[in-house]
């Protein structure tokens, strides 16, 4: 399970991550990645942000994925993958990173391994994580 300290909780956090962050997609997910230490005023300077517990993740699973059973199963799989990635955070993401994962229609039929591969690929493609994984 994904700990509360690793969850995006407000619509402002989701909106900022999706608007300010980098985006990378695959056939099953779209990954939005934003470093919350970046300046919000557009100057490009790093801001001072206190972050506790590591990177934060948020999920968007729409009705396009499938019925309620499939959506909930997909959400559980995505949360599990995010928890694994958060556990690897010193190697993959800094504590100031915010990640929003939007599940696409194909994610309902994808296995957990496929979802993890696509999310890690999306994070690498966004250019913010090391590619040695």
Image: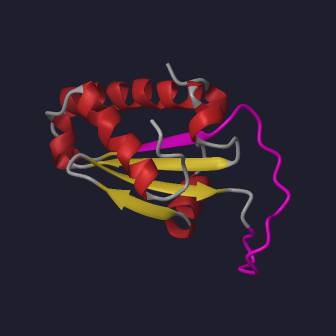
Q: Give the colour scheme of this rendering.
A: secondary structure
Q: Is residue 13 magenta?
A: no
- Residue at the (57%, 28%) spot, across then down: 88
Q: How many marks?
A: 0
Q: Is residue 52 magenta?
A: yes
- Residue at the (46%, 56%) spot, across then down: 32
Location of residue 55 by image quarter: top right
- Residue at the (55%, 55%) spot, across then down: 128
Q: Position of residue 44 (x, y in %)?
A: 73, 76
Spot the residue most to the top: 1
Q: Is residue 112 above or below residue 9?
A: above
In the image, 93 versus 3, the foreground residue is 93
Q: Position of residue 130 (x, y in %)?
A: 53, 46
Image quadrant for the C terminus? Answer: top left
Spot the residue most to the front: 132
Q: Is residue 21 above or below residue 109?
A: below
Q: Position of residue 24 (x, y in %)?
A: 37, 59
- Residue at the (71%, 80%) spot, across then down: 42
32 to the left or right of 63: right
Query: Which contiguous range is marked in magenta?
Result: 39-60
Spot the residue most to the right: 48
Res. 101 visible in picture:
yes
Spot the residue most to the bottom: 43
Q: Is residue 108 above or below residue 80?
A: below
90 to the left or right of 117: right
Q: Position of residue 115 (x, y in %)?
A: 29, 35
122 to the left or right of 67: right
**SS assignment for the magenta stretch, majority:** loop
Res. 60 visible in picture:
no
């Amino acid at each position: 399970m994904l700990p509360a300290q690793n969850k995006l909780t407000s619509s402002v956090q989701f909106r900022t991550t999706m608007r300010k962050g980098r985006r990378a997609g695959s056939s099953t997910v779209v990954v939005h990645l934003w470093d919350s230490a970046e300046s919000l005023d557009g100057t490009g300077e790093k801001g001072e942000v206190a972050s506790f517990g590591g990177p934060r993740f948020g999920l968007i699973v729409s009705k396009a994925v499938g019925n309620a059973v499939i959506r909930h199963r997909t959400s559980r799989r995505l949360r599990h993958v995010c928890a694994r990635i958060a556990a690897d955070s010193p190697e993959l993401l800094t504590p100031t990173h915010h990640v929003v994962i939007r599940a696409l229609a194909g994610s309902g039929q994808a296995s957990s391994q496929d979802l993890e591969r696509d999310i890690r690929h999306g994070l690498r493609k966004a250019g913010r994580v090391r590619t040695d994984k």
